[in-house]
Amino acid sequence: MKYLITGGAGFIGSHLSESLLGDGHSVTIVDNYSTSTPDNIAHLAGASGLRVEELDVVESPDKIDTLVRESDCVIHLAAAVGVELVVKDPVRTITTNVHGTENVLIPAAKYGKRVVVASTSEVYGKSSHEKFSETDDLLIGSPMNSRWSYACSKLLDEFYLMAYQRTGAFPGTVVRFFNTVGPRQTGRYGMVVPRFVGAALRGEPIFVYGDGGQSRCFCHVRDVVRALKLLLAEPGSVGQVFNIGSQELVSILELAHRVVKLTGSRSPIKFLSYDEAYEQGFEDMRRRCPDTDKLHGLTGWRPESSLDDIIRDVADDLRRRR
């Protein structure tokens, strides 16, 4: 197979590229390195079947058209990522996520290519459900709060893909990631696990936002890549939306304590209000846990790595990079 992966030098994209190349496929990586780095794919240099194009999916529609035409399958991961980036630059968030996806889907429809678009658990918004299901109604916050621009832009991506899918333009699938974590992820844009682990390894204070009672589930990138490959191989995934994530729920305060323990750190844990961390009036989701029964029912997938495994792997990776 010939895969085109936008955002292929990013955190998830680099791991997916590595895995597909290892299976003997050809992979073309498109990335502008705005929130990624060439270091993520440096170890793939010289790999048979690898092609790397430094391009912006928003600014290079003609080149993207050519690359889509030459591929068998398009996996669209390129996006504005991280809460800090979303809050500080909402215009870039919307432009990248909406027009970037448009520039991928138009040629995919023209040439009838298999497409997977990455979405996010953020689309569930202010839902209070114990577990989020793909068929749930979605409750997004006010446009006066830039925090929700990311969720809305990714939700529009989902509607865009499904509109094309219903016309028969291409076979498409949406995946909603729930806090994917692992080696090569940076804490620079607000990702909590590498931010906590990095501070712990440096012996610096670990800042917990809010009261720390907000809870999340963290899934190892290896498990996410495995889920993606299973969905790509399954015809039943076409025209569907799938949650991908762990169900091991942990509060952010408990996560901080676990990071301190597993890294052997003496870092103090301190609290920072959302207004100080982001912006006045910032709204957070109190609980975020995926229902993954749909994915399991179709493919048999379940995550294999625990939260402790994830913390150790992130710590080992950060030590190596230091």
Image (cartoon, rainbow, N blue to C red):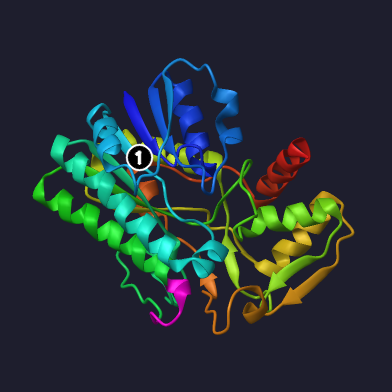
Check disc 1 and report the residue beneath it.
75
Residue at left 37%, top 56%? 97
The number of discs equals 1
Q: Is residue 279 above or below residue 1?
A: below
Residue at left 45%, top 79%? 145
Q: State the image coordinates of residue 11 (x, y, percent, origin top left).
A: 54, 43
In the rendered image, the residue lying farthest to the right is 266
Q: State the image coordinates of residue 311 (x, y, percent, origin top left).
A: 70, 49
Q: Is residue 17 left or right of residue 185?
A: left
User: How would you rate the neighbour count of disc 1 (Cα within 10 Å): few for under 14, some for 14-19, many for 20 or more?
Assistant: many
Q: Is residue 102 magenta?
A: no
Q: Is residue 110 left or right of residue 298?
A: left
What segment carries the magenta color? 142-148
- Can you tell which quarter of the image residue 317 is in? top right
Residue at left 35%, top 63%? 153
Q: State the image coordinates of residue 184 (x, y, percent, origin top left).
A: 62, 41
Look at the image and tell me in which quarter the C terminus lies: top right
Q: Is residue 201 left or right of residue 296?
A: right
Q: Is residue 277 above or below residue 200?
A: below
Residue 69 in sight in this render: yes
Residue nearest the observer in this picture, 235 or 23: 23
Residue 132 in sight in this render: no
Disc 1 residue type?
A: Ile
Q: Is residue 144 magenta?
A: yes
Task: Identify the element where label 1 is drawn.
Answer: strand
Q: Is residue 17 left or right of residue 311?
A: left
Residue at left 59%, top 27%? 42
Q: Is residue 1 above or below residue 76?
A: above
